[in-house]
Image: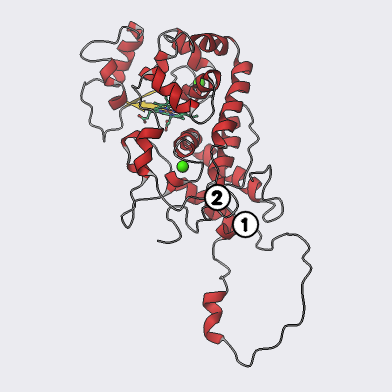
Amino acid sequence: DLLLNYYSESCPNAEDIIKQEVTDLYNEHGNTAVSWVRNLFHDCMVKSCDASLLLETVNGIESEQASERSFGMRNFKYVSTIKEALEKKCPLTLGGPRIEMKTGRRDSKESYGNFVEESLPNHNDSITLVLSRFQSIGLDVEGIVALLGGPRIEMKTGRRDSKESYANFVEESLPNHNDSITLVLSRFQSIGLDVEGIVALLGAHSVGRTHCTNLVHRLYPTVDPTLDPQYAEYLKGRCPTPNPDPKAVLYARNDRETPMILDNMYYKNLLGHKGLLIVDQQLTSDPTTYPYVEKFAADNGYFQDQFAKAVLLLSENNPLTGADGEIRKDCRYANSI
Ligand code: HEM
Ligand SMILES: [Ca+2]
Ligand SMILES: [Ca+2]
């Protein structure tokens, strides 16, 4: 099962090491924090919080990162930075239970010199024997939401990694930016979130950015009438043409007021008709979601409590535990590769 402080015996410093790395990365590139929040969503919604998202395209495996839905995701390379720090610093001497051993073994007649290297790991082999790669993301989000001014969320650890990529499930698991509110709600309800939790979770769009390709249909040829006209003018300045080159780094911030703080400004923006994506703005037009938009807009503390609850629920979607899945040696590839 997932536990609080799962590695307390096998690697007591694991969580501190990860938190330190995450904080260092945040201080260097604040937007790494933002990416981990989105990573949690894109991994956990697709089957399980099992790092399936981290697998790269290789040997006929198609990465989930290649999906249209993953457009704009960034900073994957820093997962390795965190992983390397763990390998370097985490003591290989593992704590564990007291084990009562049987005796009566006899001695071999020969030496097995040839088998030593293939049998014994080397001093620089990976600590991933004990640590699930995706812990880094799970723990990242815990610390990172706090770095971003959001609530501190105590997360359980002990998730194991998937053996495969679920690229085929990405589109049916993750809503699209222009999907109907009914579809959005049903996707999240399928992992056990209620309407209030869903509205809270979308508050993650209080940080980060959206590329023009995801926006221009609300600006051209005519401006979406649910968008504040002045705000639309601003967005047109950010996205000056109806057909932006998808490779160009043209984007608008999700929350122009407090772009790097995970706060309830998102809901205030929605009430001011400044929702960026169609799925965002729809939260104000649906009678089941609207009351929560108002409630969160009025009370940041209340929003943070609901956000924390919803993130916890998301982070515990269908985890691989026990003998399920595996512990990847390299988080980018299944061990069988
Ligand atoms: C209906 C559900 C959702 C849809 C359709 C959606 C869609 C999107 C899109 C299209 C972007 C912009 C990507 C780009 O152009 O670069 C984005 C960004 C983002 N999303 Fe969502 N999202 C949803 C829910 C969530 C949830 C539940 C979370 C986290 C709990 C989340 C976290 C983020 C973050 C942090 C960003 C900014 C990423 C960055 O700046 O690198 N989203 N989302
Ligand atoms: Ca997954
Ligand atoms: Ca904000």
Q: CA distance from mark 2 to mark 1?
A: 21 Å
Mark 1 CB lies closer than 8 A to ligand 2? no
Quadrant of res 192: top right
Tell me if label 2 and label 1 are in contact, CB under 8 Å: no
Q: Which residue is mark 2?
A: 160
Left or right: 173, with 213 as reference point: right
- Residue closest to the eye, 113 or 29: 113
Q: Which residue is mark 1?
A: 89
Specify which label sits upstream in the sequence, 2 or 1.
Answer: 1
Q: Which mark is residue 32?
A: none
How far from the left and from the top, in percent, is residue 113?
55, 86
Q: Please, is residue 304 above or below residue 78 in the view? A: above
How far from the left and from the top, in percent, is residue 319?
55, 43
Q: Residue at x 27, y 33 (%)?
A: 248
Quadrant of res 185: top left
On-image quarter of the C terminus: bottom left
Residue type, mark 2 in image: Arg
Left or right: 209, with 105 as reference point: left
Q: Residue at x 54, y 12 (%)?
A: 292
